[in-house]
């Protein structure tokens, strides 16, 4: 990969924002660890029953490829806070530990798709739809939908368990694992709290932009960037000052990341996002983008938004109409400005931390990988 980035007048970056995700050969190493876990756990499940294979197959498909943002932030959080002499000694153990974040993410995605009633994930049937299809194809008794939901919940629970196992069996010193585990426990609690707040917003029919931003912070922002950085810092034995410094970078960047995700959920290209066009609109997600549009809409615009938001049968014309309203209210432009402001805030905070190269450069580039993506 090439080192450094060049800032252009319009804020663009002249090199690929994906380069930092491949630094330290991170993505292939994470994938190799995932494959090893699935092979080992697959053998354990096969010893229980051959009927377990569809569970492992579903995870192989879900965890094949991906950006690996969470392990990347955790890994570089560790690199930025550890002694250079320990990098080679502990590198593989740290990689093992941070790969657990991919299983935590898989748990969150599987359960989130159940709660949202999503049909697809990364261009494939969502786990609960996949297992409902299995039930239907085998002509088993009972409801295919109930079977699919139950199987997906259990699959997510397995991922949550294996995420713990990866951290605890990583081979890191026990003191480092103990410190990291406290951060990891807080991260999981915050994530589940954010998921509940999201459910609550859906049930209430949405509300203020402030409430929507709280969901952003706890459902996604903290556990995507800030807490992985903290996890890496604790694995390095860093003190609280480093953790606080990482928050100045990680929290606003995490919020920008989720705001970008919300924009893509409405305006993204299905070929890039792996989900149908306007899927967030059909699911009725009460995002910051939607809350801003409702806050700024005329009475007629607000009525149309409320009428069609959450309609599972919303067609292409309906998606186009809601996109037009969101853009006309200025909500899209506001989201883009906020993404830029939060990213700039994160980069200013990063510049105040003495991390050295290549960590500083990689974290700078990761900020653009997280917020200027099309997928």
Image (cartoon, helix red, strand yellow):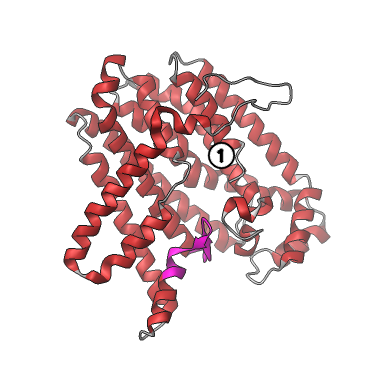
> Which residue corresponds to the image point at 65% horizontal and 20% vertical from the top-left?
7
Mark 1 lies on residue: 257
On the picture, is 25 further left or further right than 311?
Answer: left
Residue 83 location, quadrant = top left
Q: Nearer the viewer, residue 54 or 228?
A: 54
Residue 178 location, quadrant = top left
> Which residue corresponds to the image point at 28% horizontal and 37% vertical from the top-left?
96
Highlighted range, magenta: 115-130
- Above or below 168: residue 323: below
Q: Nearer the viewer, residue 182 or 65?
A: 65
Classify mark 1: residues with Cα within 10 Å, few (<14), some (14-19) or many (20+). Answer: many
Task: Decide if residue 154 is in sight here.
Answer: no
- From the top left corner, tell me how far across and down residue 272 is, in percent: 60, 50
> Which residue corresponds to the image point at 42% horizontal and 55% vertical from the top-left?
62
Task: Decide if residue 209 is in sight here.
Answer: yes
On the picture, is 193 further left or further right than 324?
Answer: left
């Amino acid at each position: 990969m090439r080192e450094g980035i060049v800032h252009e007048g319009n804020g663009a970056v002249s090199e690929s924002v994906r380069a930092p995700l491949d630094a330290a050969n991170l993505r292939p190493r994470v994938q190799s660890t995932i494959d090893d876990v699935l092979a080992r756990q697959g053998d354990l499940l096969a010893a229980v029953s051959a009927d377990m294979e569809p569970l492992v197959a579903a995870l192989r498909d879900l965890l094949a490829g991906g950006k690996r943002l969470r392990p990347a932030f955790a890994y570089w959080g560790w690199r930025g806070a550890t002694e250079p002499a320990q990098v080679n000694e502990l590198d593989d153990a740290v990689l093992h530990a941070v790969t657990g974040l991919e299983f935590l993410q898989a748990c969150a995605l599987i359960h989130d798709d159940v709660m949202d009633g999503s049909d697809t994930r990364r261009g494939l049937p969502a786990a609960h739809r996949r297992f409902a299809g299995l039930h239907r194809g085998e002509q088993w008794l009972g409801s295919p939908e109930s079977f699919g939901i139950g199987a997906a919940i259990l699959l997510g629970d397995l991922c949550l368990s294996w995420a713990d196992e990866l951290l605890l069996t990583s081979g890191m010193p026990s003191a480092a694992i103990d410190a990291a585990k406290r951060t990891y426990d807080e991260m999981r609690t915050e994530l589940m709290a954010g998921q509940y707040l999201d459910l609550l917003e859906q049930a209430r029919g949405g509300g203020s932009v402030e409430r929507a931003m709280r969901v952003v912070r706890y459902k996604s922002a903290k556990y995507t960037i800030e807490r992985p950085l903290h996890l890496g810092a604790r694995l390095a034995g860093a003190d609280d000052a480093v953790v606080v410094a990482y928050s100045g970078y990680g929290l606003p960047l995490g919020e920008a990341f989720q705001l970008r995700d919300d924009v893509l959920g409405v305006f993204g290209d299905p070929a890039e996002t792996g989900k149908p066009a306007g899927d967030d609109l059909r699911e009725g997600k009460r995002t910051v983008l939607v809350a801003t549009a409702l806050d700024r809409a005329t009475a007629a615009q607000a009525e149309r938004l409320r009428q069609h938001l959450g309609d599972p049968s919303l067609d292409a014309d309906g998606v186009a109409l809601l996109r037009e309203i969101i853009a006309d209210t200025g909500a899209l432009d506001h989201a883009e400005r906020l993404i830029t402001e939060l990213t700039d805030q994160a980069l200013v905070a990063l510049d105040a931390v003495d991390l050295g190269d290549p960590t500083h450069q990689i974290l700078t580039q990761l900020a653009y990988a997280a917020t200027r993506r099309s997928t």
